[in-house]
Amino acid sequence: MALKLTFFGGAETVTGSNFLVEGTKGKLLVDCGIEQGRDFCQADMYAPFAYDVPSLDALVVTHAHLDHVGRIPKLLKEGFKGRIYMTAPTKDLAQLIMEDSARIMAADARDKGLPLLYEERDVAAAMSHIDVIEFHKEWEAAPGLSCYLRNTGHILGSASVRIRDMGDGSDGVTLALTGDIGNTPSPYLPDPEAIDDADVMVMESVYGDRLHTHVDERVDELQKALMEAIKRGGTILIPAFSLERTQLMLYEISNLMDAGKLPKIPVFLDSPLAIKATDVYSKWGSEFFKKDVQAELKHEHDIFRFPMLTQTLTREESEKILEAPEVKIIMAGAGMSHGGRIGRWEQKYLPDPKTTLFMVGYQAPGSPGRILQDGGSQVRLGGNMVTVRGHIQSFSGWSAHADRDGLIAFAEMTQPRTKTIFCALGEPSSARFLAQRLHGFLGVNAIVPVLKQQWEITKQGVKEITH
């Protein structure tokens, strides 16, 4: 018995997760995401999927980020009839993300005279195909292919998936795909769970060549940076990744203010998506947070909201932020500054040298956020070239992704069973660096895959079929 694995996304790039797994009888996809940091309406986004969509039996989703769920409605438009499997929080968050994506793409397509990739009704159709799956439950996702989910601690509800080819009923070959692996320890999410039953693993490598600021030091770093920004007397902008980064920043800023380590200045969450996502975090926290935080949530009812926080859902509420004193914090979407309300605030405030812009997450190559992070003196936002005079500060410790050492430690937990590890979902340089480290430290067969590359997986190892 053997499995076939094809990299239709997530190879040679961080985003666009899309893996096809074929067994003796059935076949399924793992993730169906959009490649971010790019124009939604580029021609290749409209190209048909490179595989026979109607023949797919199932889709398993690791988590709700756009680069893992963003093309699911398109999949249904091209004839997908199977079931879609994910955890309960992922279902709620994925609906928010896909609906938001549909709205953004509608506006983008309208401005450029292009057809819609999909609409909100396509999102509703996709939601009707979803079955909620619990962690640590084996189920037959496709004929002859059983799956098992484990918590990865990346965002709420995020999961790795282990796939077994049941074939003729004997103990078949197993393949695990990590999705994204969390940066530990999180204040409220559990640590990633070890995968100890995979012959072959596909793992992320976003920060495969870098180390983060240690999580024990990042709050002190944030507190110091906020105090310096406040002394400048300007506005503090934080591009908001709506899932996890926003909630993490709110949690820590609230704690700093409560402890008297930060002046009680106005904080605005100016992102309808982030506001709704935070509601989902609060909804599922009593079940999916760490045990001690579950107790905290039961006592306080909400760990993300505090007196100085104002949430601005409507455009009218957003515009009133201008009336607040200059020394304020504005968290607004999107996280790479490629859409949403943050662009409006960056256009207004970045020309002011008193402004501080915090970069607290990964910025894809070519995105406005990456240009700002790399020290660009000008950046195009909302069709306008903006001169950058404000202070730009990047933080490495706030990523929701494990760093180099975290990834190596995660891979080490797969031993001695896992003999081959594909380093995917990373820029080529970081994937190659991680692969070299894994081979050197663990002695595993570490491979950096390329797009559309197909591999045969057996108990004896892996073999490239096509390239």
Image (cartoon, rainbow, N blue to C red):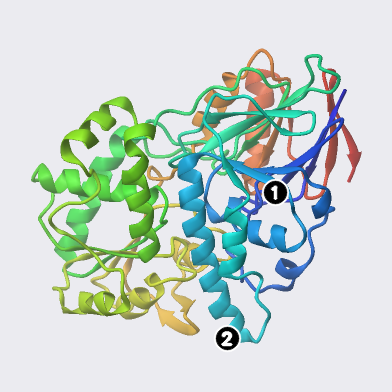
Label 2 SS = helix
Around disc 2, counting alpha carbons within 10 Å, would you say few (fewer than 14), some (14 to 19), or many (20 or more)? few
Residue 230 at what x, y percent from top left? 17, 61
Residue that mark 1 sits on: 18
Residue sitting at x 40%, y 62%: 273
Q: Three-letter amino acid code at disc 1?
A: Asn
Q: CA gap, disc 2 to disc 1?
A: 28 Å
Q: Nearer the viewer, residue 22 or 401?
A: 22
For residue 137, above or below residue 22: above
Tell whether 87 sits left or right of 19.
left
Q: Position of residue 362 (x, y in %)?
A: 49, 52
Q: Measuring from the top left, give residue 441's x and y in whole percent.
A: 63, 20
- Residue 280 picture location, percent across and down: 37, 49
Q: Is residue 288 above or below residue 359?
A: above
Q: Is residue 242 left or right of residue 353?
A: right
What SS does tag 1 mark? loop
Residue 50 relative to residue 110: left or right: right
| Quarter of image, res 25 | top right
Disc on res. 111: 2
Residue 261 appearing in the image: no
Answer with mark 2 or mark 1, whichever residue precedes in sequence: 1
Give the class, few, some or many, for how many residues have Cα within 10 Å of label 1's Cα (few <14, many ≥20): many
Judged left or right of residue 19, residue 66 is left
Q: Amino acid at mark 2?
A: Asp
- Residue 205 found in image quarter: top right
Q: In what quadrant of the picture does the N terminus appear?
A: top right
Q: Residue furthest front?
A: 128
